[in-house]
């Protein structure tokens, strides 16, 4: 028996000869895309070796020599090891911004320097975000440079990389499918130069062709190339993290409220998960962080497992779901000051897909419903009429997020839809677009329903009012220049008028004694300044206080067949004082408060009060 290693090209011709000659063993592929056949021949099969060209033969050397040759070749040629997808994935998804992907890949590496091509990255991969967390394997692993390569797999790229390799061109004709197989030598625009047994052929590029494998360096998805150096060959586990756009989550609540029992019979929170990354994720651990990733940094961490929620049996009108019909509630932890929600089960989500896993499911949550009339900032004076258009009375649901209320887990802020049962017990959506903020464990919260009650209404009117009139300013006579009014008469002496006969002054100044400054412009200016300064020193008269007083009425109408309690919110003027009131006001602030009004079934109740306040 003669043992040897035959190094031969892919192809049915050589393989058929090997099998016909009694070659045993299964072909293996080396880094050049060539087959290594472990050949066992007898003396009668030595003819096979003569049929195989001498340049294809390699005598079987010792294992040490062969390993040395492989090692040297890998170091010199830069062997590429492709990793098509990770073995495990963990996604941390934010409510806004890029998600963080933690993944583990298993790669079988030779000793020495090697290139690892990580494929299957998302199209929205953030190029400068890749980090290696840790590596475990049989020997030391020294990281080298890495490089990012966008998706580059195309027909032209395949042909360019296939030069020197076997290719089969497929051409569909009227006579059938024609296959042309040979070695691709050149790509000349839209023409291919093929070498086969018949020589060289120049053929147009067909729409279909076959290659033995995808050449190294091509990927249908973005790829990252690492260039590490290993101390020993073997399987290494590579843990890494990077960021990608295209992943988002948004919580949406469904609240099933029965006003007759005073219970939220079912409270569900589902998460809308959307994947537009360009990649598929299989069996991924999902962590949902209630924050925005605006700085391209990922958060990791798992808080202590929250206590499970024990669900009570459904109310008679509730839908017939059992507690086992839903997935477990998500675990809740903290990352800094933010909450993180870890879904209990791994999830697979394809590119372009949206999934809605459950985050929280609770039953029979006690609720306090409040009917309330919103505050008004003004009243209109009018007479009361039975058919007047009435004001809406809204509904507010008050809940508490604790274990006694069958809750007790931090809730993310999100949209809320409220459902209520009809007369047959079927739940109908009554408020589709509400919103609640994030609710801490143990915190009270409320739902302000946007749809008012159809059976409870209210009206406001101004019964009477009185307001002090404005005080009129007294008229002041006009004083001309010189300080005397126009009707003042002066005595003019001399000039032949004996006894000081009176005559109209017509605005003239009284006679004065002579002096050096009399009648000069400077003297006139001095006198005008004295008059102006004297007027400024006069004290302004304080206005008399003015008040307004009003008599107001709020009437609440109850058209239900049961009694109701309504909170009437009221805004009052600053600095007011009571004149009278029929109900007590519980003050919220200096000028606002609430009247609590009990209204019997089918009746109406009026709240009246009088107030007085200063208006100037």
Image: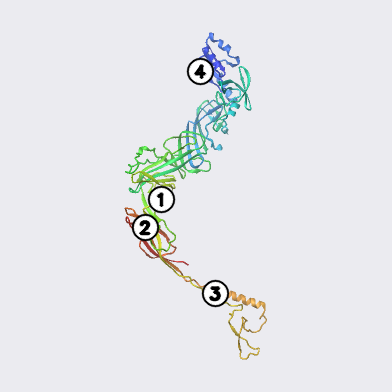
Q: Is residue 577 above or below residue 196?
A: below
Q: Is residue 343 above or below residue 188?
A: below
Of helix, strand and loop, which one carries label 1?
loop
Check the image and tell me how it is coloured. rainbow
Name the residue carrying label 3: 538
* Dot 3 or dot 2, earlier in sequence: 3
Of helix, strand and loop, which one carries label 4?
loop
Q: Nearer the viewer, residue 41 or 455?
A: 455
Of helix, strand and loop, which one carries label 3?
loop
From the image, state whether disc 4 or disc 2 is nearer to you: 2
Residue lying furthest front: 174
Q: Position of residue 228 (x, y in %)?
A: 56, 30
Name the residue carrying label 2: 556
Q: Nearer the viewer, residue 380 or 151?
A: 380
Does the CB distance between marks 1 and 4 fall below 8 Å?
no
Please name the residue shown 48% across and 30% down the image.
Answer: 87
User: What separation in Å lies between label 3 and label 1 (alpha carbons)?
Assistant: 62 Å
Name the residue carrying label 1: 451
- On the question of residue 61 being in view, the answer is no
Does the CB distance between marks 4 and 2 fall below 8 Å?
no
Name the residue carrying label 4: 26
User: What separation in Å lies between label 3 and label 2 (alpha carbons)?
Assistant: 56 Å
């Amino acid at each position: 028996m003669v043992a040897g290693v035959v190094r031969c090209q892919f192809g049915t011709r050589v393989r058929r000869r090997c099998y016909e000659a009694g070659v045993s063993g299964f072909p293996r592929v080396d880094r050049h895309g060539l087959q290594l056949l472990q050949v066992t021949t007898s003396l009668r099969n030595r003819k096979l070796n003569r049929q195989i060209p001498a340049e294809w033969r390699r005598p079987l050397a010792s294992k040490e020599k062969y390993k040395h040759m492989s090692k040297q070749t890998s170091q010199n040629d830069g062997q590429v090891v492709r990793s098509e997808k990770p073995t495990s994935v963990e996604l941390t998804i934010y409510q806004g911004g890029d998600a963080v992907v933690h993944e583990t890949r298993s790669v079988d590496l030779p000793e020495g320097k090697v290139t690892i091509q990580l494929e299957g990255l998302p199209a929205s991969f953030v190029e400068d975000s890749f980090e290696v967390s840790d590596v475990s394997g049989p020997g030391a692993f020294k990281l080298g440079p890495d490089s990012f390569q966008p998706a580059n797999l195309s027909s032209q790229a395949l042909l360019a990389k296939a030069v020197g390799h076997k290719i089969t061109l497929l051409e569909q004709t009227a006579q059938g499918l024609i296959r042309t197989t040979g070695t691709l030598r050149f790509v000349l625009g839209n023409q291919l130069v093929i070498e086969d047994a018949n020589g060289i052929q120049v053929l147009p590029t067909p729409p279909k062709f076959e290659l033995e494998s995808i050449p190294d360096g091509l990927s249908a998805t973005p790829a990252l190339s690492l260039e590490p150096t290993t101390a020993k060959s073997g399987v290494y586990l590579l843990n890494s993290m990077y960021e990608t756009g295209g992943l988002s989550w948004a919580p949406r609540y469904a609240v099933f409220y029965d006003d007759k029992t005073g219970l939220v019979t079912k409270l569900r929170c589902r998460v809308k998960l959307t994947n537009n990354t360009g990649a598929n994720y299989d069996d991924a651990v999902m962590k949902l962080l209630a924050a925005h990733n605006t700085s391209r940094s990922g958060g990791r961490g798992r808080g202590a497992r929250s206590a499970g929620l024990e669900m009570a049996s459904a109310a008679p009108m509730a839908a017939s779901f059992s507690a086992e019909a839903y997935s477990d509630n998500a675990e809740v932890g903290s990352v800094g000051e933010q909450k993180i929600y870890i879904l209990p089960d791994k999830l697979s989500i394809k590119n372009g897909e949206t999934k809605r896993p459950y985050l929280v499911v609770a039953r029979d949550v006690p609720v306090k419903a409040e009917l309330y009339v919103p505050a008004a900032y003004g009243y209109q004076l009018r007479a009361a009429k039975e058919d007047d258009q009435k004001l809406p009375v809204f509904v507010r649901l008050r809940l508490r997020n604790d274990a006694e209320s069958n809750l007790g887990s931090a809730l993310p802020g999100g949209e809320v839809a409220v459902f209520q049962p009809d007369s047959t017990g079927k739940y109908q959506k009554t408020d589709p677009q509400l919103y609640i903020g994030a609710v801490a464990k143990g915190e009270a919260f409320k739902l302000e329903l946007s749809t008012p009650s159809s059976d409870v209404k209210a009206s406001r009117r101004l019964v009477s009012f009185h307001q002090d009139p404005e005080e009129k300013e007294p008229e002041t006579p006009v004083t001309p220049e010189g300080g005397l009014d126009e009707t003042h008469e002066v005595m003019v002496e001399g000039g032949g008028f004996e006894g000081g006969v009176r005559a109209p002054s017509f605005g003239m100044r009284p006679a004065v004694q002579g002096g050096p400054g009399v009648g000069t412009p400077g003297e006139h200016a001095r006198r005008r300044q004295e008059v102006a300064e004297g007027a400024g020193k006069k004290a302004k008269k304080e206005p008399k206080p003015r008040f307004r007083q009003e008599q107001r009425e709020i009437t609440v109408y109850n058209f239900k067949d049961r009694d109701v309690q309504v909170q009437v919110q009221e805004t009052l003027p600053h600095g007011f004082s009571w004149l009278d009131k029929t109900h007590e006001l519980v003050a919220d602030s200096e000028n606002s408060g609430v009247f609590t009004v009990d209204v019997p079934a089918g009746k109406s109740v009026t709240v009246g009060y009088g107030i007085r306040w200063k208006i100037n």
